[in-house]
Amino acid sequence: MGVTRAELSLVELFAAFSVALVLTAFPITPGGIGTVDAALIALLIAFGVDSSTAVAADLLWRSVWFLPQLLVGALAVAKVGWDRRQDRHVAS
């Protein structure tokens, strides 16, 4: 993402993501969307990352965090729909 170790150490990065993960345990909004993102971006900026890189890191983290869950959920819904369709054909 273009951030060097001189700008942000691994400990600071781990601290920012750890605080963001802890905040997901007490979400104000579903999934903590908005509040957790604001906290993560603010912490990254406080540790010295520029704002555009902090926003990009947050978007990348959210996509890695939610996309696998959405994919598994979509596959499960498709499987249930397929099973129900097969049951209707067998019953007819």
Image (cartoon, rainbow, N blue to C red):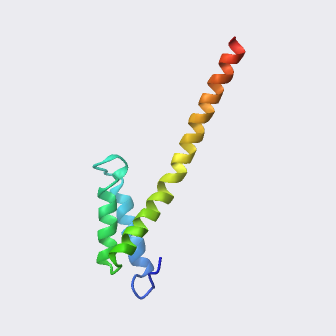
The residue located at (33%, 81%) in the rendering is: 48
Q: Nearer the viewer, residue 32 or 22?
A: 32
Quadrant position of residue 4: bottom left
Q: Nearer the viewer, residue 1 or 47?
A: 1
Residue sitting at the far right: 90
Relative side of 73 to 35, left or right: right
Residue sitting at the far front: 52
Q: Which of 51 and 14 is in front in this view?
A: 51
Quadrant position of residue 46: bottom left
Relative side of 29 to 70, left or right: left
Quarter of the picture containing the C terminus is top right
The residue located at (42%, 77%) in the rendering is: 11
The residue located at (68%, 23%) in the rendering is: 86
Relative side of 37 to 88, left or right: left
Q: How many labels does the image show?
A: 0
Where is residue 62 shown, x and y percent of the image?
44, 59
Residue sitting at the far top: 92
Where is residue 73 shown, x and y percent of the image?
54, 41
Quadrant position of residue 57: bottom left
Where is residue 27 shown, x and y percent of the image?
31, 50
87 shown above or below 43: above
28 shown above or below 2: above
Where is residue 89 shown, x and y percent of the image?
70, 17
Q: Nearer the viewer, residue 6 or 3?
A: 3
